[in-house]
Image (cartoon, coloured by chain):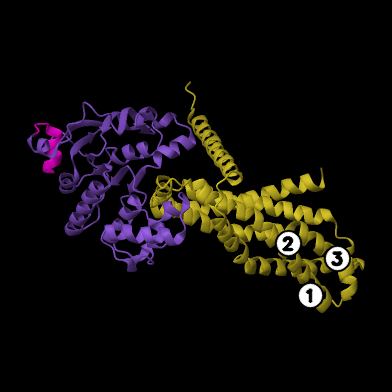
Chain colours: A purple, B yellow
Amino acid sequence: MKTQKETVSPKIRMTDVCKAFGNKKVLNHLNLDVYPGESLVVIGGSGTGKSVTIKCILGLLEPESGRVEIDGKNVLELSGKEREKVLSQFGMLFQNAALFDSLSVWENVAFSLIQNQHMNKAEARKIAIKKLAQVGLKSDVADVYPADLSGGMRKRVGLARAIATNPAVIFFDEPTTGLDPIMSDVINDLIKDTVKNLGATALTITHDMNSARKIADRIAMLYEGKIIWVGTVDELDKTTNPYVRQFVAGSAKGPIQMEVKVEK
Amino acid sequence: MQLDLSFVDKLGRVVLNFFRATGKLGIFCGQTVYHCVTPPFYLKAVLAQMIEIGFYSLPVVALTTLFSGMVIALQTYEAVSQFSAEGAVAMVVRVAVIRELAPVMAGLMVAGRIGAAMAAEIGTMRVTEQIDALSTLSTNPFKYLIAPRVLAGVVMLPILVLIGDVIGICGGYMIGVYKLDFNATTYLTNTWTYLKPMDIISSMTKAGVFGFIITLLGCYNGFQSQGGAQGVGRATTNAVVSSSILILIFNYILTEMLFNA
């Protein structure tokens, strides 16, 4: 566990963030701190607002109220270019990798290097192949198109793209969803090693407890739009919080009631 | 006595939804224009879209304008022959093709081909989070996806229509000379002598506006799509229907402005 909380200011701080879609409040005065260099995993059931939390930090969604601070700056108050500059230190692995269909694997990985850093193509390709090697992919996949890759390979390419610019913060959206247990473990190891090697801050959202245990320095549980528990993996096993215990046990019985719509 | 206000309620919702949709489109349009004229410019993307819109749409535009010119020549002859006014055929073909048929037919054909493709492509990118991925890679989707398509549409539609004008006139010429036995020189003279700069200006203006409408609505509908494959399908249909209707409405408005003002 990181013991720097009292002395170090958070890399990311969300304060009283609210976000609703129509009448449905997804984030309800959410507060969350992510400290530099730590790997925080947010767990929670489907529809509890995990993806919305990440999208609010990334600027893909605009919260109705609250503050989202990166290095102490409220990104919601920054102008377009300042905001882009702050957000440029982020990398993101999407749930389904979100690779660009029209570009080859290496062009996907090198996208930001070519478009934003204006690197020449030969150099960008070299870096892309190096990043692919870091996630366990050989150079012969570089010229393949995403449609020809398996789910696990797509995730790896997505990870290579996320780390291509050596970001300070990496977000992982359900990194093991849709993968078999062995490939899930491979991806978990890759995420752990990559974050460690880059010295990056990582924020992962998942409902895969194996993944959470493996990746996390700290775990936070999101329920009804609020963080209801934060602790280390050891603390997770000892907690008496009935919501956390039910979620970790994967039990249908407990305080968390799933909404099941029955057609009449 | 209790008043039934459900009709008023429904009407209110329809009006609010209309203004909401119009406002969203207006904001999207404003953002698009802003990103079209401010750097950075993705010139390779613009060039790729110019080839897609211009080069690959050429066969369908050529065919529609060719047959439109031929039909206009036949119908005009049928209508004016009883007044011994065969000389009017060339002039009617010129006016009909250059001022109306070439821009409108090309617009509708490109709306079906390009508008649908843009809505489907951008819609798929939206529902598979590729547009979100662009943003996280510090690339503005408006600059990278929307602006190149709109710029290419505004540039290429006039070029396509100009080619369509020539092919349409050729269609009329073929019918006039080879089927109706008009004198070739007289036909061409009747076409060129009465050709006014305003004919070309109106044709190009309409084409540019139609190019903007087609690409804007293709991108807008794709960008707003949600809900997976069904949402992408709906976006594609909306893109074609809305741009086709707007092309016809703006054709009338531009004709009024250019010729009756």
In front: label 2 or label 3: 2
Pointer 1 residue: B174
Residue B217 is one of the magenta-drawn residues: no
Majority secondary structure in the magenta region? helix
Of the pair B6 and B204, the residue shown nearer to us: B204
Q: Earlier in the sequence, mark 2 or mark 1?
A: 2
Pointer 2 residue: B162
Instruction: Determine whether label 2 and label 1 are within 8 Å by CB.
Output: no
Q: Is residue B220 above or below residue B159?
A: above
Pointer 3 residue: B191
Q: Is residue B191 left or right of residue A172?
A: right
Q: Position of residue A249 (x, y in %)?
A: 11, 42
The reply to whether residue A102 is in sight is no
For image coordinates 45% across by 60% down, the residue present is A121
Q: Mark 1 belongs to which subunit?
A: B
For image coordinates 35% across by 30% down, the residue present is A69
Q: Position of residue A129 (x, y in %)?
A: 34, 61
Q: Which segment is the magenta one? A: A239-251
The CA span between labels 2 and 1 is 19 Å
Name the amino acid type tagged 1.
Answer: Met
Q: Name the element at disc 1.
A: helix
